Image: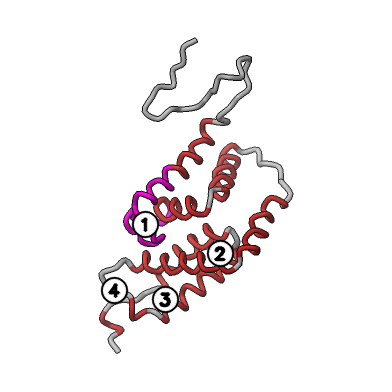
Amino acid sequence: MTTDRHRFDIVGQLAPLRRYARSLTRDETDAEDLVQEALVRAYEKRESFRPERNLRAWLLSILHNIFVDRIRARRSEQLRIGHAGNLAPHSEAPPQDHAVRLAQVRQTFLALPEEQRAALHLVAIEGLSYAEAATTLAIPIGTLMSRLGRARATLRAIEDGPVLIERPDPTRIHHLKIVGGSDDTTD
């Protein structure tokens, strides 16, 4: 057996795996189960790992594939988990501005569609390149960039406030930034 041929150090990759799993599942217990299953599968498939490949990206890809498999196998459970967040009682926001802001960003991030949340997590939090993230998600790089753009636009909307604000003229849209155009309006 040639285990010394390349370093297969998955212990050093536990933190990124746990972060990504929490991002996907939105549940600490499910995330730990997902990481454990991914590690078992990685260990079983360790001979298929190519040393020229990024180990973290390979492990994140395994974790992502297991997550997708679980979604396909348990659609009804995923719907229940998704609705459980809506049933949780809302707590009062803390008075500190930064805590409120962080809660808004977190809530918006977790409310993103799974595809956008996964793409943003891999690129922004895990630091994978677009190519590595696209490979991990098994999608074309253009699709990844589109998902990133939509996710980032949703998060930027927190800064801009609501897109539509009631004004005396209800046909006017306020605080809507047009890409490639101007925010100036003439009356």
Give the foreground label among 2 and 3. Answer: 2
Kind of element beneath mark 1 = helix
Circle 4 packing at 10 Å, graded few (<14), some (14-19), many (20+), is few
Circle 1 packing at 10 Å, graded few (<14), some (14-19), many (20+), is many
Going from the N terminus, do you reach mark 2 or mark 3 first?
3
Mark 3 — residue? 42
Alpha carbon distance from label 2 to label 3: 20 Å
Which kind of residue does numbered mark 1 sit on? Ala
Mark drawn on residue 50: 4
Going from the N terminus, do you reach mark 1 or mark 2 first?
2
Total marks in image = 4
Which kind of residue does numbered mark 4 sit on? Arg
Question: 168 or 27, which lies in front?
Answer: 168
Label 2–label 4 contact, CB within 8 A: no
Above or below, comparing residue 119 to residue 171 in the picture: below
Q: Residue at x 52, y 30 (%)?
A: 160
Above or below, comparing residue 24 to residue 151 in the picture: below
Above or below, comparing residue 186 to residue 89 in the picture: above
Q: Give the residues in magenta.
A: 125-149
Going from the N terminus, do you reach mark 4 or mark 3 first?
3
How far from the left and from the top, in percent, is residue 50?
29, 74
Label 4–label 3 contact, CB within 8 A: no
Label 1–label 2 contact, CB within 8 A: no
Kind of element beneath mark 4 = loop
Question: 19 or 34, which lies in front?
Answer: 34
* Quadrant of image for the N terminus: bottom left
